[in-house]
Image: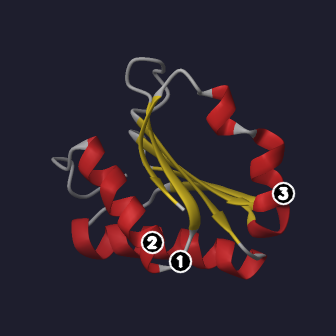
Amino acid sequence: MKGNETLKPLDLARAVVEALEEKKAENIVLMDLQEHSIVADYFVICTGASDRQLNALAEAVTDALRKKHRLKSPRVEGHAAGGWLLIDYRTVIVHVFSAEQRKRYQLEDLWRETKTLLRIQ
């Protein structure tokens, strides 16, 4: 990832949440993993209603962070058709799920000992 390296992880996570809200993501959750993981500081998890919306949500996040904060080249894994896209900004990992896959993987339950900082229905 290149760009604004001075952006604090929590500010990055909030920018992700804002981009997801603007594109009408459902059930957005921001989790603080700092005391529980070396993988990332924060998870942002959301649900999209269709494959098309999953792609739009992922694109909205990457576009917003590129335009507002000059962040480029996040690692994106998964496929909308598979119901799960992961966007890796190192300190913040974004999980964009279909409702079915979110229920299947239950990341909130897996990481239940972490702090939930924000939940937007």
- Viewer-side residue, 43 vs 2: 43
Pointer 2 local density, CA inside 10 Å: few below 14, some 14–19, many at least 20: some
Alpha-carbon span between mark 1 and mark 3: 18 Å
Q: Amino acid at mark 2?
A: Glu
Neighbor class of circle 3 (other Cα within 10 Å; few <14, some 14-19, many 20+) is few
Residue 65 visible in the snapshot: yes
Q: Position of residue 99 (x, y in %)?
A: 77, 60
Q: Do the numbered discs 2 and 1 sit on residues whose CB atoms are within 8 Å? A: yes
Whole-percent x and y of residue 49? 73, 74
Task: Residue at 56%, 73% (x, y): give it.
Answer: 57
Q: Which residue is mark 3?
A: 100
Q: Residue 94: x and y, percent?
A: 52, 52
Q: Amino acid at mark 3?
A: Glu
Secondary structure category for the residue under label 3:
helix
The colour style of the image is secondary structure
- In the image, taking residue 76 as reference, residue 89 lies left or right, namely left
Q: Earlier in the sequence, mark 1 or mark 3?
A: 1
Q: Residue at x 83, y 61 (%)?
A: 82
User: Along the horizontal axis of the image, is 99 left or right of 2?
Assistant: right
Question: What amino acid type is highlighted by mark number 1?
Answer: Lys
Separation of marks 2 and 1 at Cα, in angstroms? 5 Å
Residue of label 1: 24
Question: Residue under circle 2?
Answer: 21
Q: Residue furthest front?
A: 121
Residue 72 visible (yes or no): no
**In-image side of 63 versus 45 (left or right):** left
Who's the residue at 72% across and 81% down the image?
A: 52
Q: Earlier in the sequence, mark 3 or mark 2?
A: 2
- How many C-alpha atoms fall within 10 Å of the one at disc 1: few (<14), some, or many (≥20)? some
Using the image, determine if residue 115 lies above or below residue 14. Answer: above
- The residues tagged by marks 3 and 2 sit, at their Cα atoms, a distance apart of 20 Å
